[in-house]
């Protein structure tokens, strides 16, 4: 665990009364920060997410891609991050040539001005016409802010061929990940998403109180580092919900390794888009739910 002299970004200490065997003592506890982050696209409010306030430009890039606001991260021209009294606003400036990585019509038309509402009012930002997902989102919720059923279960296009990886690569990634999570080591309360090469070497990790946020941050960081999403695999320290599968597939990731369980819908979507989904990954064992041919 990091020493008290080194407090990682995105963490804080707060006073706590510890009670053990009936004896109370005052102490300081180490906690992860969680703040409202208002995502705007070209000045228009899109969603408010509860997130750990670090790596926010990575978050913006990944979020814009996996939520269908851009067809490619290359369409993002600038990201402006501004702290306000009630939280943080992140404005994603695009080339206004948004495509979609979802099958069919992956996005809804904008609502008329009289029906729209500025979702960022809660954190002191713009009052402008809202894009489809215009409600606040919680740190652990991937569907909060979606208004229609068709917005919730999005079917991504098939992923690419992807790599083949060995059991030893998965073992190597799992063993090395713990030492690469400074915020979790300090607080014990955040998720991580890591990118590993086919040999299991981890080259990028992002952390957040929200599992979806951690994955979005990783996807954004990978784009900045020009990492090929078709040449490696992602490891997540959470369950594999369908939102995690969808975000990975939209980013072109072909293999997802989750430390916890997948959901039935996640397995269905992974099979449908050709993604290899692994759950209950622990040293010495894991379950392969879809496309096992990529595991050798």
Image (cartoon, rainbow, N blue to C red):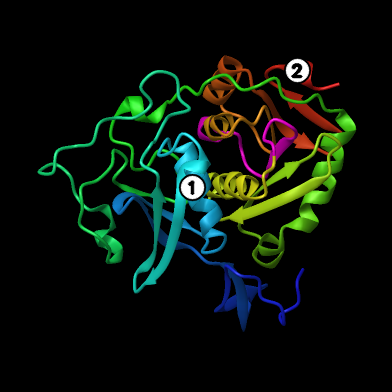
- Image quarter in which the N terminus is found: bottom right
**Viewer-nearest residue: 122 or 184:** 122
What crowding class fits label 2: few (fewer than 14 Cα within 10 Å), some (14-19), or many (20 or more)?
some
For marks 2 and 1, the one nearer the N-term is 1
From the top left corner, tell me how far across and down residue 294 is, in percent: 77, 20
**Mark number for residue 140?**
1
Which residues fall within the magenta stretch?
Answer: 228-244
From the top left corner, tell me how far across and down residue 125 is, in percent: 27, 63
Q: Is residue 125 magenta?
A: no
Position of 71 compared to 253: left or right?
left
Q: CA distance from mark 2 to mark 1?
A: 29 Å
**Residue ID at (72%, 82%):** 5
Quadrant of res 258 = top right
Quadrant of res 116 = top left
**Viewer-nearest residue: 223 or 21:** 223
Q: Which residue in the structure is indicated by mark 2?
A: 292
Question: In the rendered image, is residue 181 in sight?
Answer: yes
Question: In the rendered image, is residue 259 in sight?
Answer: no
Label 2 residue SS: helix
Q: Residue furthest left?
A: 114
Residue 232 higher or lower than 95, as above or below: above
From the top left corner, tell me how far across and down residue 262 is, in percent: 61, 29
């Amino acid at each position: 665990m990091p020493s008290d002299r080194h407090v990682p970004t995105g963490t804080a200490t707060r006073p706590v009364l510890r009670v053990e065997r009936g004896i109370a003592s005052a102490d300081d506890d180490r906690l992860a920060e969680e703040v409202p982050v208002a995502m705007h696209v070209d000045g228009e409010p899109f969603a408010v997410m509860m997130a750990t306030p670090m790596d926010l430009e990575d978050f913006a890039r990944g979020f814009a891609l996996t939520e269908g606001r851009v067809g490619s991260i290359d369409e993002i021209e600038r990201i402006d991050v501004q702290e306000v009294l009630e939280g943080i606003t992140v404005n994603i400036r695009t080339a206004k040539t948004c495509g979609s990585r979802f099958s069919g019509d992956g996005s809804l038309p904008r609502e008329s001005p009289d029906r729209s509402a500025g979702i960022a009012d809660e954190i002191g930002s713009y009052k402008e016409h809202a894009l489809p997902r215009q409600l606040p989102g919680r740190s652990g919720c991937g569907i909060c802010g979606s208004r229609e059923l068709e917005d919730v279960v999005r079917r991504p296009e098939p992923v690419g061929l992807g790599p083949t990886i060995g059991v030893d690569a998965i073992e190597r990634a799992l063993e090395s990940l713990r030492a690469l999570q400074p915020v979790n080591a300090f607080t014990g309360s955040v998720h991580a998403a890591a990118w590993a090469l086919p040999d299991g070497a981890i080259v990028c990790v992002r952390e957040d109180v929200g599992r979806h946020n951690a994955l979005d941050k990783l996807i954004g960081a990978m784009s900045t580092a020009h990492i090929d999403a078709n040449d490696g695999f992602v490891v997540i320290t959470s369950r594999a919900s369908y939102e995690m599968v969808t975000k990975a597939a939209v980013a072109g990731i072909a293999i997802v390794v989750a430390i916890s369980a997948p959901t039935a819908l996640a397995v269905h979507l992974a099979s449908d888009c050709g993604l290899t989904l692994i759950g209950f990954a622990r040293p010495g064992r894991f379950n392969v739910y879809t496309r096992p041919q990529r595991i050798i």
